[in-house]
Amino acid sequence: VPTFVNSTCCFLKEEKTVPQQQTPLLLTTNLKALRLPTMLAEHAKLAGEAADSNQDYLQYLLRLTELELATRSANALQARIKQAGFPVQKDLDAFDFSAATGLSKQKVLELARCQWIDQRSNCCFLGSSGTGKTHLAVALGLAACRLGKRVRFFTAATLVNRLEEAQKQYQLDRFLKQLDKLDLLICDELGYLSFNRTGAELLFQVFADRYERASLLITSNLPFSEWQQVFQGERMTAALLDRLTHHCEIFEMNGESYRFRESMKEKKTGRSKRA
């Protein structure tokens, strides 16, 4: 049996080097293939800065990857905000807590940390029109988006319309599965419009299915005692409130309308100028 010496089995490989003039082109091609657009756009600039400041290869690579990650994070946030469908973008720093009678600023700011969403709890803002309920709902929704949560914003009327349309097109299960994937579902203006029996039952199903599975944020101009107007019956209303309020932060906002207050200020300002 022939014996093979290790040295005779080694093949010398000729080292291949890429010509220097081809390096930028190949690097560009590789970065495109790897789908690293920020590194593609910034690598030359950062390379020049690294050379000027005598940075080593690892420092240069670290800066380049940090920039790519930061851009991806910003793009992902914008995508979550767009997907949420907020009517406007309002943050808590623009909310006038001094005019919100009985509303705890500390409690609301604590909600912006989104631990209640991690705990699959709910939140309700109840009160008359113009007291800032939608503003707070949007602000808390934006805070959730910034922390990587999946959020969708609907008015109650829009959500019911979507549910009924999906049912008519035999796509209700598909739409419900989309809602199930959300960390936070915001339902604004519950009680402003009445629904038919089918719409009320579909909305009840969405709310009830999220019990201890995912979070709800609801704003309404009606106190809980009048929600039977929406859900057309005491039995369905009682069953819903039992689930909704089990783990829930409830805020009553019954101060003066912000829009009315601002309108009166503008009128006074106008009269002062004319005088």
Image (cartoon, rainbow, N blue to C red):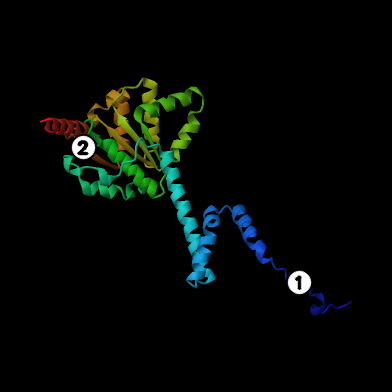
Quarter of the figure with the N terminus: bottom right
Estimate the x, y position of residue 24 in percent, counting from the top left.
62, 60
Q: Which amino acid type is shown beneath numbered disc 2?
A: Glu
- Spatial distance from mark 1 to mark 2, Cα to Cα? 78 Å
Q: Which amino acid type is shown beneath numbered disc 1?
A: Glu
Residue shown at the point (37%, 33%) measured from the top left: 154
- Image check: 225 left or right of 180? left
Quarter of the figure with the C terminus: top left
- Image check: 164 left or right of 33? left
Tell me the tag on residue 223: none
Q: Nearer the viewer, residue 31 or 233?
A: 31
Q: Nearer the viewer, residue 126 or 257?
A: 257
Label 1, residues with CA under 10 Å away: few <14, some 14-19, many ≥20? few
Q: Earlier in the sequence, mark 1 or mark 2?
A: 1
Estimate the x, y position of residue 63 in percent, counting from the top left.
48, 63
Seen as rendered, the residue at the extreme top is: 196
Label 2, residues with CA under 10 Å away: few <14, some 14-19, many ≥20? some
Secondary element under disc 2, as helix, strand or loop, is strand
Secondary element under disc 1, as helix, strand or loop, is loop
Is residue 152 visible in the rendered structure shown here? yes
Indicate whether 16 appears above or below 215. below
Is residue 59 visible in the rendered structure shown here? no
Q: Are marks 1 and 2 in contact (CB under 8 Å)?
A: no
Indicate whether 73 appears above or below 207. below
Tell me the tag on residue 14: 1
Tell me the tag on residue 252: 2
Q: Nearer the viewer, mark 1 or mark 2?
A: 1
Residue shown at the point (53%, 65%) measured from the top left: 47
Estimate the x, y position of residue 233 in percent, counting from the top left.
30, 23
